[in-house]
Amino acid sequence: MKKVLIANRGEIAVRIIRACHELGIQTVAVYSEADHEALHVLQADEAICIGKPSALESYLKIPHVLSAAEITHADAIHPGYGFLSENPNFASICESCKISFIGPSSEAISVLGDKAKAKAAAKASNCPIIPGSDGIVESVEEGLKIAEKIGYPLLVKAVSGGGGKGIRFVHNKEEFSKMFPQAQAEAKANFNNPDVYLEKMIVNPRHVEVQVLADEHGNCVYLGERDCTIQRRRQKLIEETPSQICDDKMRKELGEASVRLAKSVGYSSAGTVEFLIDKDKNFFFMEMNTRIQVEHTVTESITGVDLVKEQIKIAMGEPLSFTQEEIKFEGHAIQFRINAENPSMNFAPSPGKLDYYLPPGGPHVRIDSACYTGYKIPPNYDSMVAKLIVRGSNREEAIAIGKRALKEFHIGGIHSTIPFHSYMLNDQNFIDNDYNLNYIDELIDSGCTFEESKED
Protein backbone atom coordinates (compact mmCIF):
# COMPACT_ATOMS: atom_id res chain seq x y z
CA MET A 1 0.00 0.00 0.00
CA LYS A 2 1.69 3.16 -1.23
CA LYS A 3 -1.08 5.75 -1.58
CA VAL A 4 -4.40 6.07 0.28
CA LEU A 5 -7.31 8.18 -0.90
CA ILE A 6 -9.44 9.42 1.99
CA ALA A 7 -13.09 9.42 0.91
CA ASN A 8 -14.16 11.82 3.63
CA ARG A 9 -13.68 15.30 5.05
CA GLY A 10 -13.27 17.17 8.33
CA GLU A 11 -11.50 15.90 11.42
CA ILE A 12 -11.62 12.22 10.49
CA ALA A 13 -9.90 12.92 7.16
CA VAL A 14 -7.14 14.80 9.01
CA ARG A 15 -6.89 11.92 11.51
CA ILE A 16 -6.44 9.35 8.72
CA ILE A 17 -3.89 11.51 6.89
CA ARG A 18 -1.79 11.70 10.06
CA ALA A 19 -1.88 7.92 10.51
CA CYS A 20 -0.89 7.33 6.89
CA HIS A 21 2.01 9.77 7.05
CA GLU A 22 3.33 8.11 10.21
CA LEU A 23 3.24 4.79 8.32
CA GLY A 24 5.08 6.32 5.36
CA ILE A 25 2.05 6.17 3.07
CA GLN A 26 1.15 8.99 0.66
CA THR A 27 -2.33 10.51 0.86
CA VAL A 28 -4.94 11.93 -1.48
CA ALA A 29 -7.70 14.23 -0.22
CA VAL A 30 -10.98 14.60 -2.05
CA TYR A 31 -13.08 17.69 -1.50
CA SER A 32 -16.26 19.42 -2.61
CA GLU A 33 -16.42 23.01 -3.84
CA ALA A 34 -17.46 24.00 -0.31
CA ASP A 35 -14.29 22.47 1.16
CA HIS A 36 -11.59 24.00 -1.02
CA GLU A 37 -10.03 25.70 2.04
CA ALA A 38 -10.46 22.70 4.34
CA LEU A 39 -7.56 21.51 6.48
CA HIS A 40 -7.55 17.96 5.08
CA VAL A 41 -6.98 19.47 1.62
CA LEU A 42 -3.94 21.36 2.90
CA GLN A 43 -2.44 18.41 4.78
CA ALA A 44 -2.72 15.67 2.15
CA ASP A 45 0.03 15.07 -0.41
CA GLU A 46 -2.48 15.54 -3.22
CA ALA A 47 -6.03 16.88 -3.41
CA ILE A 48 -8.73 16.66 -6.04
CA CYS A 49 -12.16 18.27 -6.26
CA ILE A 50 -14.98 15.77 -6.76
CA GLY A 51 -18.09 17.91 -7.06
CA LYS A 52 -20.49 20.52 -5.80
CA PRO A 53 -21.13 21.41 -2.13
CA SER A 54 -23.96 18.91 -1.74
CA ALA A 55 -22.73 15.58 -0.36
CA LEU A 56 -24.96 13.81 -2.88
CA GLU A 57 -22.98 15.48 -5.67
CA SER A 58 -19.53 14.98 -4.16
CA TYR A 59 -18.65 12.77 -1.16
CA LEU A 60 -21.48 10.33 -1.88
CA LYS A 61 -20.83 10.20 -5.64
CA ILE A 62 -19.11 6.83 -6.05
CA PRO A 63 -17.99 7.38 -9.70
CA HIS A 64 -16.35 10.69 -8.71
CA VAL A 65 -14.48 9.11 -5.79
CA LEU A 66 -13.27 6.18 -7.88
CA SER A 67 -12.24 8.50 -10.72
CA ALA A 68 -10.15 10.49 -8.23
CA ALA A 69 -8.48 7.26 -7.11
CA GLU A 70 -7.72 6.30 -10.71
CA ILE A 71 -6.38 9.73 -11.67
CA THR A 72 -4.05 9.87 -8.64
CA HIS A 73 -3.06 6.17 -8.82
CA ALA A 74 -4.25 5.53 -5.26
CA ASP A 75 -4.15 1.82 -4.43
CA ALA A 76 -6.35 2.06 -1.32
CA ILE A 77 -9.36 4.01 -0.05
CA HIS A 78 -10.17 4.81 3.58
CA PRO A 79 -13.84 5.81 3.93
CA GLY A 80 -13.65 7.22 7.48
CA TYR A 81 -17.12 7.32 9.08
CA GLY A 82 -20.42 8.42 7.56
CA PHE A 83 -20.75 9.01 3.80
CA LEU A 84 -19.69 5.77 2.00
CA SER A 85 -18.11 4.01 4.99
CA GLU A 86 -20.91 1.45 5.42
CA ASN A 87 -21.97 1.20 1.79
CA PRO A 88 -21.51 -2.45 0.70
CA ASN A 89 -21.83 -1.49 -2.98
CA PHE A 90 -18.93 0.93 -2.68
CA ALA A 91 -16.79 -1.66 -0.89
CA SER A 92 -17.67 -4.24 -3.55
CA ILE A 93 -16.73 -1.89 -6.40
CA CYS A 94 -13.38 -1.17 -4.71
CA GLU A 95 -12.77 -4.91 -4.44
CA SER A 96 -13.59 -5.46 -8.13
CA CYS A 97 -11.31 -2.58 -9.12
CA LYS A 98 -8.41 -4.07 -7.12
CA ILE A 99 -8.40 -1.07 -4.77
CA SER A 100 -7.91 -1.95 -1.10
CA PHE A 101 -10.96 -0.90 0.91
CA ILE A 102 -9.73 -0.04 4.40
CA GLY A 103 -12.60 -1.68 6.21
CA PRO A 104 -14.41 -5.01 6.32
CA SER A 105 -15.50 -7.01 3.28
CA SER A 106 -18.59 -5.98 1.33
CA GLU A 107 -20.24 -9.23 2.49
CA ALA A 108 -19.71 -8.37 6.17
CA ILE A 109 -21.02 -4.85 5.63
CA SER A 110 -24.10 -6.24 3.86
CA VAL A 111 -24.93 -8.57 6.74
CA LEU A 112 -24.21 -6.18 9.59
CA GLY A 113 -25.58 -3.10 7.83
CA ASP A 114 -28.99 -4.75 7.56
CA LYS A 115 -30.35 -4.60 11.09
CA ALA A 116 -32.59 -7.66 10.65
CA LYS A 117 -29.69 -9.77 9.31
CA ALA A 118 -27.37 -8.40 12.00
CA LYS A 119 -29.86 -9.38 14.69
CA ALA A 120 -30.05 -12.91 13.25
CA ALA A 121 -26.24 -13.13 13.20
CA ALA A 122 -26.07 -11.96 16.80
CA LYS A 123 -28.65 -14.51 17.86
CA ALA A 124 -26.77 -17.28 16.06
CA SER A 125 -23.51 -16.32 17.81
CA ASN A 126 -25.14 -16.37 21.25
CA CYS A 127 -25.01 -12.60 21.63
CA PRO A 128 -28.07 -11.47 23.65
CA ILE A 129 -30.64 -9.70 21.49
CA ILE A 130 -33.61 -7.46 22.22
CA PRO A 131 -36.95 -9.29 21.76
CA GLY A 132 -38.60 -8.32 18.48
CA SER A 133 -39.85 -9.42 15.10
CA ASP A 134 -38.05 -12.16 13.16
CA GLY A 135 -37.07 -9.96 10.24
CA ILE A 136 -38.95 -7.37 8.20
CA VAL A 137 -42.58 -6.50 8.99
CA GLU A 138 -44.55 -5.76 5.83
CA SER A 139 -47.84 -4.30 7.02
CA VAL A 140 -49.71 -2.68 9.90
CA GLU A 141 -51.88 -5.80 10.26
CA GLU A 142 -48.87 -8.12 10.53
CA GLY A 143 -47.16 -5.70 12.89
CA LEU A 144 -50.11 -5.49 15.26
CA LYS A 145 -50.12 -9.27 15.71
CA ILE A 146 -46.38 -9.31 16.44
CA ALA A 147 -46.68 -6.30 18.75
CA GLU A 148 -49.22 -8.14 20.90
CA LYS A 149 -46.70 -10.95 21.43
CA ILE A 150 -43.73 -8.65 22.11
CA GLY A 151 -45.69 -6.27 24.30
CA TYR A 152 -45.71 -2.47 24.46
CA PRO A 153 -43.85 -0.14 24.56
CA LEU A 154 -41.90 -0.98 21.41
CA LEU A 155 -39.94 0.57 18.56
CA VAL A 156 -40.59 0.51 14.83
CA LYS A 157 -37.09 0.71 13.31
CA ALA A 158 -35.74 1.10 9.78
CA VAL A 159 -33.67 -1.88 8.62
CA SER A 160 -31.16 0.51 7.01
CA GLY A 161 -31.46 3.13 9.73
CA GLY A 162 -28.90 5.24 11.50
CA GLY A 163 -28.56 8.56 13.29
CA GLY A 164 -32.00 8.26 14.85
CA LYS A 165 -33.79 8.27 11.48
CA GLY A 166 -36.64 5.86 10.69
CA ILE A 167 -37.50 5.15 14.33
CA ARG A 168 -40.91 5.49 16.00
CA PHE A 169 -41.75 4.91 19.68
CA VAL A 170 -45.08 3.15 20.11
CA HIS A 171 -46.96 2.78 23.42
CA ASN A 172 -50.21 1.11 22.30
CA LYS A 173 -51.99 -0.35 19.27
CA GLU A 174 -53.67 2.96 18.38
CA GLU A 175 -50.27 4.62 18.10
CA PHE A 176 -48.93 1.63 16.17
CA SER A 177 -51.40 2.07 13.29
CA LYS A 178 -50.26 5.70 12.89
CA MET A 179 -46.53 5.34 13.58
CA PHE A 180 -45.79 2.25 11.48
CA PRO A 181 -46.41 3.91 8.05
CA GLN A 182 -44.59 7.03 9.26
CA ALA A 183 -41.49 4.96 10.03
CA GLN A 184 -41.71 3.29 6.61
CA ALA A 185 -41.99 6.65 4.85
CA GLU A 186 -39.06 8.16 6.76
CA ALA A 187 -36.96 5.06 6.05
CA LYS A 188 -37.74 5.35 2.35
CA ALA A 189 -36.92 9.06 2.29
CA ASN A 190 -33.61 8.74 4.17
CA PHE A 191 -32.26 5.35 3.07
CA ASN A 192 -34.24 4.56 -0.10
CA ASN A 193 -35.44 1.43 1.71
CA PRO A 194 -38.86 1.37 3.43
CA ASP A 195 -38.28 -1.93 5.27
CA VAL A 196 -38.81 -1.83 9.05
CA TYR A 197 -38.83 -4.29 11.93
CA LEU A 198 -40.14 -4.26 15.50
CA GLU A 199 -38.17 -4.27 18.71
CA LYS A 200 -39.14 -4.26 22.39
CA MET A 201 -38.35 -0.93 24.02
CA ILE A 202 -35.82 -1.22 26.85
CA VAL A 203 -37.08 1.43 29.28
CA ASN A 204 -34.50 4.04 30.42
CA PRO A 205 -31.44 2.09 29.22
CA ARG A 206 -27.75 2.89 29.11
CA HIS A 207 -25.95 2.79 25.76
CA VAL A 208 -22.61 0.98 25.87
CA GLU A 209 -20.50 -0.13 22.90
CA VAL A 210 -17.49 -2.42 22.51
CA GLN A 211 -14.51 -1.75 20.24
CA VAL A 212 -13.20 -4.77 18.34
CA LEU A 213 -10.29 -5.32 15.98
CA ALA A 214 -10.09 -8.35 13.71
CA ASP A 215 -7.51 -9.30 11.08
CA GLU A 216 -7.62 -11.53 8.01
CA HIS A 217 -5.92 -14.38 9.87
CA GLY A 218 -8.75 -15.21 12.26
CA ASN A 219 -7.52 -13.09 15.19
CA CYS A 220 -10.07 -10.89 16.95
CA VAL A 221 -9.82 -8.86 20.17
CA TYR A 222 -11.96 -6.43 22.12
CA LEU A 223 -10.52 -3.18 23.49
CA GLY A 224 -12.98 -2.41 26.24
CA GLU A 225 -16.27 -0.57 26.24
CA ARG A 226 -17.38 3.04 25.79
CA ASP A 227 -20.40 4.59 27.50
CA CYS A 228 -22.30 6.73 24.99
CA THR A 229 -25.47 7.32 27.02
CA ILE A 230 -25.33 11.13 26.98
CA GLN A 231 -27.25 11.74 23.76
CA ARG A 232 -29.74 14.21 22.34
CA ARG A 233 -32.34 12.67 20.05
CA ARG A 234 -30.12 9.60 19.74
CA GLN A 235 -27.15 11.73 18.68
CA LYS A 236 -24.09 11.15 20.89
CA LEU A 237 -22.61 14.14 22.71
CA ILE A 238 -20.30 12.72 25.40
CA GLU A 239 -18.49 9.38 25.35
CA GLU A 240 -16.31 7.89 28.05
CA THR A 241 -14.42 4.76 28.97
CA PRO A 242 -14.56 2.71 31.06
CA SER A 243 -18.30 2.71 31.63
CA GLN A 244 -19.25 3.23 35.26
CA ILE A 245 -21.98 0.59 35.10
CA CYS A 246 -19.65 -2.21 33.96
CA ASP A 247 -17.64 -4.31 36.35
CA ASP A 248 -14.87 -6.63 35.17
CA LYS A 249 -17.27 -9.56 34.76
CA MET A 250 -19.70 -7.61 32.54
CA ARG A 251 -16.80 -6.09 30.59
CA LYS A 252 -15.51 -9.57 29.78
CA GLU A 253 -18.99 -10.83 28.84
CA LEU A 254 -19.63 -7.83 26.57
CA GLY A 255 -16.23 -8.20 24.93
CA GLU A 256 -16.51 -11.93 24.36
CA ALA A 257 -20.04 -11.60 22.92
CA SER A 258 -18.74 -8.93 20.52
CA VAL A 259 -15.83 -11.09 19.41
CA ARG A 260 -18.14 -14.07 18.80
CA LEU A 261 -20.36 -11.94 16.57
CA ALA A 262 -17.42 -10.51 14.61
CA LYS A 263 -15.90 -13.94 14.04
CA SER A 264 -19.25 -15.44 13.00
CA VAL A 265 -19.46 -13.13 9.96
CA GLY A 266 -15.77 -13.29 9.05
CA TYR A 267 -15.19 -9.70 10.12
CA SER A 268 -11.85 -8.06 9.44
CA SER A 269 -11.06 -4.43 10.44
CA ALA A 270 -12.06 -2.09 13.25
CA GLY A 271 -15.69 -2.36 14.28
CA THR A 272 -18.01 -1.45 17.12
CA VAL A 273 -20.76 -3.57 18.66
CA GLU A 274 -23.46 -1.51 20.35
CA PHE A 275 -25.58 -2.63 23.29
CA LEU A 276 -28.42 -1.37 25.48
CA ILE A 277 -28.18 -2.19 29.19
CA ASP A 278 -31.35 -2.25 31.31
CA LYS A 279 -31.82 -1.31 34.96
CA ASP A 280 -31.02 -4.88 36.01
CA LYS A 281 -27.73 -4.77 34.08
CA ASN A 282 -28.87 -7.17 31.37
CA PHE A 283 -27.29 -6.25 28.05
CA PHE A 284 -28.83 -6.58 24.60
CA PHE A 285 -27.26 -6.31 21.12
CA MET A 286 -28.40 -3.27 19.13
CA GLU A 287 -26.20 -3.13 16.03
CA MET A 288 -22.64 -3.36 14.78
CA ASN A 289 -21.01 -0.37 13.08
CA THR A 290 -18.62 -1.57 10.39
CA ARG A 291 -16.26 1.41 10.48
CA ILE A 292 -14.11 3.55 12.71
CA GLN A 293 -16.26 5.45 15.23
CA VAL A 294 -16.20 9.16 16.03
CA GLU A 295 -15.42 8.19 19.63
CA HIS A 296 -12.53 5.82 18.89
CA THR A 297 -10.27 8.38 20.58
CA VAL A 298 -11.21 7.46 24.16
CA THR A 299 -10.33 3.81 23.52
CA GLU A 300 -6.96 4.91 22.15
CA SER A 301 -6.42 7.04 25.26
CA ILE A 302 -6.68 4.18 27.77
CA THR A 303 -5.18 1.36 25.67
CA GLY A 304 -2.38 3.14 23.80
CA VAL A 305 -3.53 1.44 20.56
CA ASP A 306 -3.72 3.58 17.41
CA LEU A 307 -6.94 2.20 15.94
CA VAL A 308 -6.60 3.93 12.56
CA LYS A 309 -3.07 2.61 12.04
CA GLU A 310 -4.29 -0.85 13.01
CA GLN A 311 -7.10 -0.56 10.44
CA ILE A 312 -4.60 0.28 7.73
CA LYS A 313 -2.22 -2.53 8.71
CA ILE A 314 -5.08 -5.03 8.71
CA ALA A 315 -6.05 -3.89 5.20
CA MET A 316 -2.41 -4.52 4.19
CA GLY A 317 -2.83 -8.13 5.29
CA GLU A 318 -0.82 -7.87 8.52
CA PRO A 319 -1.88 -9.85 11.59
CA LEU A 320 -2.76 -8.06 14.82
CA SER A 321 0.41 -7.11 16.66
CA PHE A 322 -1.00 -8.00 20.10
CA THR A 323 -3.21 -10.57 21.81
CA GLN A 324 -6.23 -10.09 24.05
CA GLU A 325 -4.08 -10.70 27.13
CA GLU A 326 -1.65 -7.95 26.14
CA ILE A 327 -4.34 -5.22 26.04
CA LYS A 328 -4.25 -3.10 29.20
CA PHE A 329 -6.78 -0.48 30.28
CA GLU A 330 -5.24 2.44 32.16
CA GLY A 331 -7.08 5.49 33.47
CA HIS A 332 -10.33 7.11 32.39
CA ALA A 333 -11.03 9.08 29.19
CA ILE A 334 -13.91 11.35 28.17
CA GLN A 335 -14.68 12.81 24.74
CA PHE A 336 -16.76 15.95 24.22
CA ARG A 337 -18.22 16.63 20.78
CA ILE A 338 -17.85 20.37 20.15
CA ASN A 339 -20.50 21.11 17.53
CA ALA A 340 -21.53 24.33 15.78
CA GLU A 341 -24.88 24.39 17.56
CA ASN A 342 -26.57 26.65 20.10
CA PRO A 343 -27.54 24.62 23.19
CA SER A 344 -29.63 27.46 24.62
CA MET A 345 -31.77 27.48 21.45
CA ASN A 346 -32.52 23.74 21.33
CA PHE A 347 -29.18 23.04 19.63
CA ALA A 348 -30.01 25.13 16.55
CA PRO A 349 -27.30 24.83 13.84
CA SER A 350 -24.73 27.65 13.87
CA PRO A 351 -22.50 27.42 10.79
CA GLY A 352 -20.31 30.35 9.85
CA LYS A 353 -16.84 31.87 9.96
CA LEU A 354 -14.60 31.25 12.96
CA ASP A 355 -13.44 34.74 13.99
CA TYR A 356 -11.04 33.01 16.33
CA TYR A 357 -10.33 29.39 17.25
CA LEU A 358 -8.16 28.78 20.31
CA PRO A 359 -8.19 25.13 21.42
CA PRO A 360 -6.97 24.04 24.87
CA GLY A 361 -3.71 22.27 25.62
CA GLY A 362 -1.74 20.99 28.55
CA PRO A 363 -1.28 17.49 29.99
CA HIS A 364 -3.75 14.77 29.05
CA VAL A 365 -5.69 16.92 26.57
CA ARG A 366 -6.18 15.93 22.93
CA ILE A 367 -7.95 17.87 20.17
CA ASP A 368 -9.09 16.25 16.91
CA SER A 369 -10.28 18.98 14.56
CA ALA A 370 -10.09 20.35 11.05
CA CYS A 371 -10.79 23.94 12.09
CA TYR A 372 -8.63 27.05 12.35
CA THR A 373 -9.10 30.80 12.80
CA GLY A 374 -10.78 32.20 9.69
CA TYR A 375 -12.20 28.85 8.59
CA LYS A 376 -15.82 28.93 7.50
CA ILE A 377 -17.89 26.00 8.71
CA PRO A 378 -20.18 25.14 5.78
CA PRO A 379 -23.88 24.40 6.33
CA ASN A 380 -23.78 21.41 3.97
CA TYR A 381 -22.44 18.74 6.33
CA ASP A 382 -22.43 17.73 10.00
CA SER A 383 -21.81 20.47 12.54
CA MET A 384 -18.70 19.13 14.26
CA VAL A 385 -16.05 21.72 15.08
CA ALA A 386 -13.76 19.53 17.18
CA LYS A 387 -13.49 16.58 19.49
CA LEU A 388 -12.00 17.35 22.90
CA ILE A 389 -10.59 14.27 24.62
CA VAL A 390 -9.26 14.29 28.17
CA ARG A 391 -7.69 11.53 30.23
CA GLY A 392 -7.21 11.15 33.98
CA SER A 393 -6.07 8.42 36.32
CA ASN A 394 -9.74 8.03 37.29
CA ARG A 395 -13.14 9.54 36.35
CA GLU A 396 -12.94 12.31 38.95
CA GLU A 397 -9.60 13.50 37.60
CA ALA A 398 -10.80 13.22 33.97
CA ILE A 399 -13.81 15.42 34.81
CA ALA A 400 -11.53 17.99 36.50
CA ILE A 401 -9.25 18.10 33.44
CA GLY A 402 -12.34 18.35 31.21
CA LYS A 403 -13.61 21.38 33.15
CA ARG A 404 -10.24 23.08 32.83
CA ALA A 405 -9.91 22.30 29.11
CA LEU A 406 -13.42 23.53 28.31
CA LYS A 407 -12.61 26.85 30.03
CA GLU A 408 -9.57 27.18 27.79
CA PHE A 409 -11.49 26.43 24.59
CA HIS A 410 -12.37 29.74 22.91
CA ILE A 411 -14.34 29.91 19.66
CA GLY A 412 -15.60 33.17 18.13
CA GLY A 413 -18.11 33.88 15.38
CA ILE A 414 -20.44 30.94 16.00
CA HIS A 415 -22.29 29.25 18.83
CA SER A 416 -20.91 25.93 20.06
CA THR A 417 -21.78 23.13 22.48
CA ILE A 418 -19.00 24.12 24.90
CA PRO A 419 -21.56 25.58 27.39
CA PHE A 420 -23.50 22.31 27.29
CA HIS A 421 -20.43 20.28 28.19
CA SER A 422 -19.45 22.70 30.97
CA TYR A 423 -22.98 22.38 32.35
CA MET A 424 -22.85 18.60 32.26
CA LEU A 425 -19.55 18.39 34.15
CA ASN A 426 -21.22 20.27 37.01
CA ASP A 427 -24.47 18.30 36.78
CA GLN A 428 -24.81 16.18 39.92
CA ASN A 429 -26.61 13.33 38.15
CA PHE A 430 -23.79 13.09 35.62
CA ILE A 431 -21.17 13.25 38.36
CA ASP A 432 -23.03 10.54 40.32
CA ASN A 433 -23.46 8.35 37.21
CA ASP A 434 -27.24 8.56 37.67
CA TYR A 435 -28.69 9.03 34.18
CA ASN A 436 -30.03 7.11 31.19
CA LEU A 437 -30.47 7.43 27.45
CA ASN A 438 -33.40 9.85 27.81
CA TYR A 439 -31.74 12.17 30.32
CA ILE A 440 -30.74 15.02 28.00
CA ASP A 441 -34.06 15.01 26.14
CA GLU A 442 -35.85 15.19 29.50
CA LEU A 443 -33.66 18.14 30.56
CA ILE A 444 -34.54 19.93 27.31
CA ASP A 445 -38.25 19.20 27.78
CA SER A 446 -38.02 20.67 31.28
CA GLY A 447 -36.76 23.95 29.84
CA CYS A 448 -33.04 23.59 30.57
CA THR A 449 -30.96 25.85 28.30
CA PHE A 450 -27.53 24.62 29.44
CA GLU A 451 -26.24 28.06 30.31
CA GLU A 452 -22.67 28.34 31.55
CA SER A 453 -22.35 26.90 35.05
CA LYS A 454 -21.82 29.39 37.86
CA GLU A 455 -19.46 26.92 39.52
CA ASP A 456 -15.87 27.68 38.65
Image (cartoon, rainbow, N blue to C red):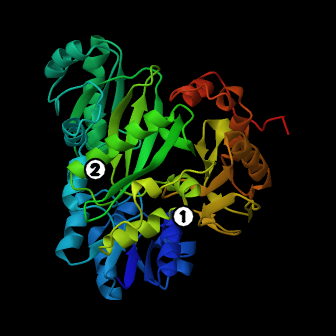
Left or right: residue 414 compared with residue 136:
right
Q: Residue at x 28, y 18 (%)?
A: 176
Q: Does 362 sit above or below residue 418?
A: below
Q: Looking at the image, which residue is at 20% across and 69% down?
A: 93
Q: Considering depth in this image, is 92 or 39 the residue closer to the camera?
A: 92
Q: In the picture shown, does residue 346 fall above or below 340?
A: above
**What is the secondary structure assignment of the residue under circle 2?**
helix
- Residue 173 x/y as whole percent: 27, 12
Can the viewer see residue 411?
yes
| Quadrant position of the N terminus in the picture | bottom left
- Identified by mark 1, the residue type is Glu
Q: Which residue is mark 1?
A: 11
The residue positioned 20% from the left and 14% from the top of the image is 149
Q: Residues within 10 Å of mark 2 (few under 14, many from 20)?
A: many
Amino acid type of the residue tagged 2 in the rendering: Ala
Q: Nearer the viewer, mark 1 or mark 2?
A: 2
Query: Considering depth in this image, is 188 or 283 the residue closer to the camera?
Result: 283
Among the two numbered marks 1 and 2 on one chain, the one whose residue lies closer to the N terminus: 1
Most foreground residue, 159 or 58: 159
Label 1 Cα neighbours within 10 Å, binned few <14 / some 14-19 / many ≥20: many
Residue at which label 2 appears: 262
- What residue is rendered at 27% in x and 45% in y? 261
Q: Where does residue 279 sit, x and y in percent of width and height?
A: 47, 20
